[in-house]
Amino acid sequence: MLIRRSTDIIPSEITPRALFEDRRAFLRDAGLFAAGLAVTGLGARAVQAQGKPFAGARKSPLSVAEAATPFKDVTTYNNFYEFGTGKDDPAERAGTLKPRPWTISVEGECAKPKRWDIDELMKLAAVEERIYRLRCVEGWSMVIPWNGFPLSELVKRAEPNSKAKYVEFVTLSDEKQMPGVRLPVLDWPYVEGLRMDEAMHPLALLTFGLYGDLLPNQNGAPVRIVVPWKYGFKSAKSIVRIRFTETEPKTAWNKAIPSEYGFYSNVNPQVDHPRWSQAKERRIGEFGKRATLMFNGYGEQVASLYAGMDLKKYY
Ligand code: MTE
């Protein structure tokens, strides 16, 4: 349905496909798609063979006390459009991504720009285990034990100047490693952004692993962000550039469908997506639906960032 000729694809077709995948996953979870369970991602297997570098990571008090989604679901039910638009495409196709060697360039409005080697960056601060809820804009959610340290640790090393009002995150775009970028599904590279105070918030996590291991390719190896009070698409994967800017970054989904995906994208059950309600979500592995919580349940920590803002206007 989606992949006809590349020139035929328009962004508004993406979500219906995503909803279709969601329904298929529901059938799978209900045991009706037993054959599909045999599919295990190459990336997941590769990372399991590497040992568990973060197995002893300090458990963060910022974790939620909810059952974690099984590793298998976390690593085989993914959105990573650089590898295709199907939920199982990333696990099946991300084996071509090479997470080493890897550098991440920190630049823009700051006194100390620097190109970090990934292994040097990982040693910048103590890597913790943070169990966060992840709520996808499509209406499903997971609970994932991430391994990382606060994004603020990296931001403050760069010494942003007074013009630095926003932070832009840019994903690798290399068609040799990422077959999906050959199709104009989004205006590549994938770009996301945060306001500076959001990026400095202690919950915003620079993430290198999950379940004690390095990130599997399909989950954004070797480094991504996780911003748990926002819809999952704000959590950009496989980042190669972080840039401090004076103006609001032009983000990939906002450019593609501005009426549906805004810059802020805070989880908000009171503001519907133009094509569906956001009041409920399906936790992967559960039957039925549960209520979606304001700011994905992190309101106590983050609501003050948006005091006085009309969150219907700034969706
Ligand atoms: N980052 C990039 N570069 N490309 C993507 O397609 N998808 C986003 C986000 N980050 C995406 C991305 C979406 S829609 C979600 S829900 C989360 O990644 C999913 O993260 P997970 O696969 O680790 O659960």
Image (cartoon, rainbow, N blue to C red):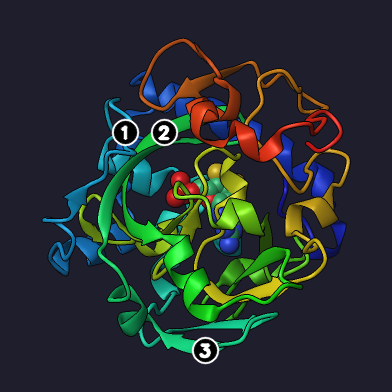
Residue contact at pointers 2 and 1, CB within 8 angstroms: yes
Q: List the single residue furthest toward the top.
A: 288
The verdict on label 2 being within 8 Å of ligand 1 is: yes
Residue contact at pointers 2 and 3, CB within 8 angstroms: no
- Residue at (13, 56) in percent of width and height: 55
204 relative position to 19: left or right? left
Give how far across and how far down residue 278 sits, in percent: 67, 22
Quadrant location, the C terminus: top right
Q: Secondary structure at mark 2?
A: strand
Q: Earlier in the sequence, mark 2 or mark 3?
A: 3
Residue 69 numbered mark, or none: 1
Q: Distance between the Cα atoms at labels 1 and 3?
A: 36 Å
Residue 206 numbered mark, or none: none
- Residue at (70, 80) in percent of width and height: 109
Depth check: give the residue in front, 216 or 108. 108
Q: Which circle, 2 or 3, is nearer the viewer?
A: 3
What's under tag 2, amino acid-wise? Met
What's under tag 1, amino acid-wise? Thr
Q: In the picture shown, does residue 1 fall above or below 47?
A: above
Q: Is residue 78 visible?
A: no
Number of residues whose C-alpha sits closer than 10 Å to that of mark 3, classed few (under 14), some (14–19) or many (20 or more): some
